[in-house]
Image (cartoon, grey):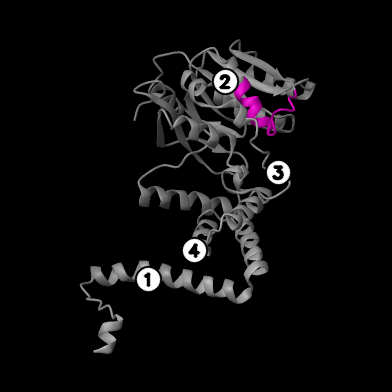
């Protein structure tokens, strides 16, 4: 399929932390190759000489690149949320493509840019291929493919195009300020649990505008995604326990996304609260239920009639 060039000019917004200076030479050229007329690179204030040199070297003095230094603001619990939104406000154009500096992107991103702002579409998400080079990342990539086949729908990722007027119209800044940092201490419950600042943006957007999930792979991660890192997996496990989720809910997700730490934390809390035998019973029931969902359709497909016995039948 030929690449669709955007009919309108657009901005790119990237947030770059000081510790990620080593990623700039690997990823920034791919973002610049998309042809945006405005590239906003959001960095900490004051920016270090090391990061500044990395940007200048990787951009080759591109006149479209603007370095935006974002001062500290204690009103925001999660700095990443502040930095990205500061970049959105500074963007010159209504159509904005955003992601992270650990992503090497490709021309398929332009398809998302073209779609936002048309037909009430406020956000268009692209797929991304997991990186990191580990067995866990291989499993996650395979499981994502399986999910797309069974659900016939792509998943939301942190690589997306957004229509700036719709974002300004829907998101509530005072609530976004309270998004906690994913590494913050303490267990969180329900909606307060860390979901990702981009997920919060999407949830606000879809209340009034359309969200599109493209199956196109727009980029590749250079490292393990935030939600798959052990510290965030632990918080997810704690959150699922506090929300009263069952093992039948947590176990499939831990397998599909290779999140062993999440499952371990959840099971540990279940044992502390209910005991070992309760957990073992949950494991057995979950496995039996899963096997039933797999085996019964096979029997029906083979034309085997399955009789259901109830109390009346037994009494006869």
Q: Compare residues 44 and 81 and report the one nearer the observer.
A: 81
- State yes or no: discs 4 and 1 in contact (Cβ < 8 Å): no
| Residue at point 42%, 67% (across, down) | 290
Tell me the magenta residue range: 72-86
Distance from the alpha carbon under mark 1 to that under mark 3: 39 Å
Residue 157 image position (x, y, % from top left): 51, 38
- Disc 2 designates what residue? 88
Looking at the image, can residue 198 be seen? yes
Q: Earlier in the sequence, mark 3 or mark 2?
A: 2
Q: Nearer the viewer, mark 4 or mark 2?
A: 4
Q: Percent x, y for residue 295?
A: 34, 71
Residue ID for mark 3: 183
Secondary structure of the residue carrying numbered label 4: helix
> Mark 4 and 2 residues: CB-CB less than 8 Å, in contact?
no
Give the vertical position of 254 relative to 65 (above or below).
Answer: below
Q: Is residue 214 magenta?
A: no
The image position of residue 101, as x and y in percent, is: 62, 30
- Mark-to-mark CA distance, 3 and 4: 27 Å
Q: Quadrant of residue 69?
A: top right
- Nearer to the camera, 285 or 69: 285
Residue 289's image quarter? bottom left
| Crowding near the residue tagged with mark 4, few <14, some 14–19, many ≥20 C-alpha atoms within 10 Å | some
Residue 74: in magenta span: yes
Q: Which residue is mark 4?
A: 248
């Amino acid at each position: 399929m030929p690449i669709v060039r955007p009919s309108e000019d657009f901005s790119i917004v990237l947030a770059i932390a000081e510790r990620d200076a080593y990623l700039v030479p690997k990823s920034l050229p791919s973002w610049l190759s998309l042809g945006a007329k405005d590239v906003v690179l959001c960095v900490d204030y004051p920016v270090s000489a090391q990061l500044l040199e990395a940007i200048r070297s990787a951009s080759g003095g591109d006149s479209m690149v603007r370095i935006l230094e974002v001062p500290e603001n204690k009103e925001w619990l999660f700095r990443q949320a502040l930095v990205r939104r500061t970049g959105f406000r500074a963007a010159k154009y209504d159509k904005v493509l955003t992601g992270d500096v650990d992503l090497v992107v490709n021309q398929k991103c332009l398809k998302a840019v073209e779609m936002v702002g048309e037909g009430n579409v406020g956000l268009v998400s692209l797929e991304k291929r997991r990186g990191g080079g580990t067995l866990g990342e291989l499993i996650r990539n395979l499981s994502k493919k399986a999910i797309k086949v069974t659900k016939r729908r792509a998943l939301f990722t942190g690589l997306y195009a957004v229509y700036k007027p719709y974002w300004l119209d829907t998101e509530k800044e005072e609530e976004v300020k309270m998004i906690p940092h994913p590494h913050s201490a303490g267990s969180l419950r329900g909606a307060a649990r860390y979901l990702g600042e981009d997920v919060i943006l999407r949830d606000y957007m879809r209340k009034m505008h359309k969200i599109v999930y493209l199956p196109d792979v727009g980029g590749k991660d250079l490292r393990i995604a935030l939600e798959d890192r052990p510290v965030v997996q632990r918080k997810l496990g704690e959150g699922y326990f506090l929300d009263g989720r069952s093992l039948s809910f947590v176990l499939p997700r831990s397998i599909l996304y290779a999140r062993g730490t999440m499952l371990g934390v959840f099971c540990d809390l279940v044992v502390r609260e209910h005991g070992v035998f309760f957990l073992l019973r949950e494991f057995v029931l979950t496995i039996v239920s899963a096997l039933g969902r797999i085996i019964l359709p096979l029997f029906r497909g083979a034309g085997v009639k399955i009789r259901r016995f109830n109390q009346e039948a037994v009494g006869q």
